[in-house]
Image: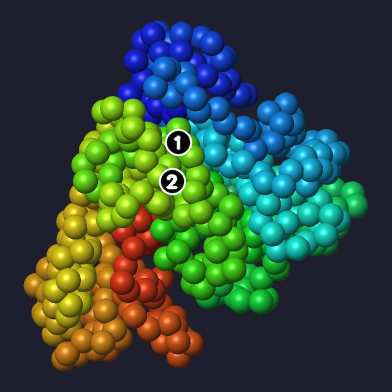
């Protein structure tokens, strides 16, 4: 079987794996033959694709991470917020995972827009337990961690659905409302009988960042409970590889790029490293493009997660990218679940679901490295108007003659006026009211504190990783939240 993106599905293809749908009428079972109507419905409901069986991928069989019945029970218990049931399911998930030497995380969880939160909660629980096991947590702790992970987004039910699913920029009030959900989860569990404090703390802090920039408490480093750190990384990873009403799904490899970019800023480094070890960057069954132009399907794992065994689409040849000398210099350049031009289709999809159409925002990037400016432009230009300037003085001048941009990305060390002074000057100018992200190669405590004093919403380490930059910019512009 192999994974086929929703926009590449064709009538007549044979389904290889059931879809577990809760709030949705689309029920897909193994063996079914796809019709165009069904494909259209899958697309409209926000599925990212399907596993199909064909001759090319016949030899490829994959295992579920946990028993699908147990997974489905978990999804239902999240939807009904049935705490007693969740306690049992958490124990069962830990038993299921503990019984295996290796938990297979090859298969994508296929879910509709509407089922997102429920599936997401169970996925986060599965990832969390596996990470917890790698960290050497005992069984009791794994049970508590699993329980907390399943419940982590309960509070979202108290936030209006239009805000959670809004595919357009959030207002400050809407953004603040979403930020309350960890506190809401804490309160929901607080009102229930006998929930251990460790679980309540874990859910309360699941959006705290390593550098203290998270919410609701702004805790940093080791003040953040270990359970929260685990749930946080698992949460963001699962959100990134999902298709949402406002964004397409990233491939696991791209989601790892985000986790990597956020190491020690958003996430605990140890946890990111474990996740990269246990979750395949290029899972079997997905299509990839190699740097020599060849197209292939991933067939299996090797010791190097970035270099799997692949099967060439053109002639069915099998190549082990880790060991084959002829492919030593060949890399996987694209494993996107969606083609590059998919952005356009997402907009169309959003427009049909929601009426709001937004204007492109302007981002001012100030950096003395030409390379950084070029790279940044390349990453952001598909979605924004990008203005690049090499010097602080020019940025100040720009502010005098132009309307305030929607976001400033500012390097710190610049030849004339340094980035921090530049922001100080801009803040004193009439009409300057946009968020600022510092763009820096420095990560020392002093720099971080200074950035904070200047009310920067974020800082991004260079060299910049494309997915990280794109997503942090979207978050700074309050387009959505991740997780
Ligand atoms: Fe959350
Ligand atoms: Fe979440």
Identify the residue shown where x is 16% and y is 91%.
416
Residue 406: where, in percent of width, then height?
Answer: 26, 62
Residue at position x 81%, y 39% from top? Answer: 92
Q: Are marks 2 and 1 in contact (CB under 8 Å)?
A: yes
The residue lying furthest to the right in this view is: 194
Helix, strand or loop under label 2: loop
Residue 47 on image: x %, y %: 46, 28
Q: Could you say whether the residue bearing mark 1 is in a helix, strand or loop?
A: strand
Image position, residue 332 (x, y; %): 32, 48
User: Which residue is identified by label 1?
Assistant: 299
Report the side of 460 relative to 1 (left or right): left
Residue furthest to the front: 325
Q: Nearer the viewer, residue 476 or 314?
A: 314
Above or below, 318 against 448 in this view is: above
Residue at 45%, 36% in the rendered image:
299
In whole angstroms, how far apart are the C-alphas of marks 2 and 1? 7 Å
Could you say which quadrant of the image residue 187 lies in?
bottom right
Crowd band around label 1 with a 10 angstrom C-alpha radius: few (<14), some (14–19), many (20+): many
Asked whether residue 346 is in view, the answer is: no
Mark 2: give few (<14), some (14-19) or many (20+) Cα within 10 Å. Answer: many
Residue on which disc 2 sits: 308
Q: Nearer the viewer, residue 87 or 35?
A: 35
Q: How many marks?
A: 2
Q: Is residue 460 visible?
A: yes
Q: Residue at x 56, y 15 (%)?
A: 30
Left or right, 235 with reference to 418: right
Who is closer to the viewer here, 87 or 333?
A: 333
Whether the residue carrying mark 2 lies under 8 Å from ligand 2 is answered with no
- Left/right of residue 208 with respect to residue 431 in the rendered view: right
Picture disc at residue 92: none
């Amino acid at each position: 079987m192999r994974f086929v993106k929703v926009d590449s599905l064709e009538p007549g293809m044979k389904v290889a794996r059931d879809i577990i749908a809760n709030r949705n009428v689309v029920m897909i079972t193994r063996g079914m033959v796809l019709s165009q109507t069904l494909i259209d419905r899958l697309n409209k409901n926000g599925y990212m694709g399907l596993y199909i069986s064909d001759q090319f991928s016949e030899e490829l069989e994959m295992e579920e991470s946990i028993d699908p019945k147990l997974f489905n029970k978990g999804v239902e218990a999240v939807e009904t917020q049935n705490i007693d049931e969740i306690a049992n399911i958490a124990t069962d998930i830990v038993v299921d995972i503990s019984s295996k030497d290796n938990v297979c995380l090859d298969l994508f969880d296929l879910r509709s827009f509407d089922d997102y939160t429920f599936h997401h909660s169970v996925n986060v629980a599965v990832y969390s337990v596996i990470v917890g096991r790698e960290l050497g947590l005992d069984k009791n702790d794994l049970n508590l961690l699993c329980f907390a992970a399943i419940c982590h987004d309960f509070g979202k039910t108290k936030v209006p659905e239009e805000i959670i699913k809004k595919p357009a920029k959030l207002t400050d009030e809407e953004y603040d409302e979403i930020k309350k959900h960890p506190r809401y989860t804490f309160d929901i569990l607080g009102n229930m009988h006998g929930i251990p404090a460790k679980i309540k703390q874990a859910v309360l802090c699941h959006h705290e960042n390593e550098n203290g920039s998270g919410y609701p408490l702004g805790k940093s480093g080791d003040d953040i409970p270990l359970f929260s750190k685990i749930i946080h990384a698992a949460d963001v990873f699962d959100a990134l590889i999902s298709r949402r009403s406002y964004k397409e799904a990233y491939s696991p490899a791209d989601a790892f790029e985000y986790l990597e970019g956020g190491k020690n800023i958003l996430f605990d480094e140890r946890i990111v490293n474990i996740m990269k070890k246990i979750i395949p960057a290029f899972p079997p069954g997905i299509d990839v493009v190699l740097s020599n132009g060849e197209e292939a399907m991933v067939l299996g794992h090797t010791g190097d997660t970035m270099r799997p065994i692949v099967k060439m689409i053109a002639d069915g040849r099998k190549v082990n990218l880790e060991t084959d000398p002829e492919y030593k210099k060949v890399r996987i350049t694209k494993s996107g679940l969606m083609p590059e031009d998919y952005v356009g289709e997402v907009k169309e999809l959003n427009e049909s679901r929601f009426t709001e159409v937004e204007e492109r925002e302007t981002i001012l990037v100030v950096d003395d490295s030409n390379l950084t400016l070029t790279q940044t432009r390349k990453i952001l230009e598909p979605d924004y108007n990008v203005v690049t300037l090499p010097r602080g003085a020019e940025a100040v001048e720009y502010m005098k003659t132009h309307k305030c941009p929607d976001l400033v990305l500012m390097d710190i060390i610049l030849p004339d006026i340094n980035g921090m002074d530049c922001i100080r000057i801009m803040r004193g100018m009439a009409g300057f009211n946009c968020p600022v992200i510092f763009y820096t190669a420095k990560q020392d405590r002093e720099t971080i504190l200074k950035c904070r004093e200047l009310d920067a919403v974020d800082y991004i380490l260079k060299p910049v990783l494309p997915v990280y930059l794109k997503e942090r910019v979207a978050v700074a512009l309050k387009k959505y939240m991740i997780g």
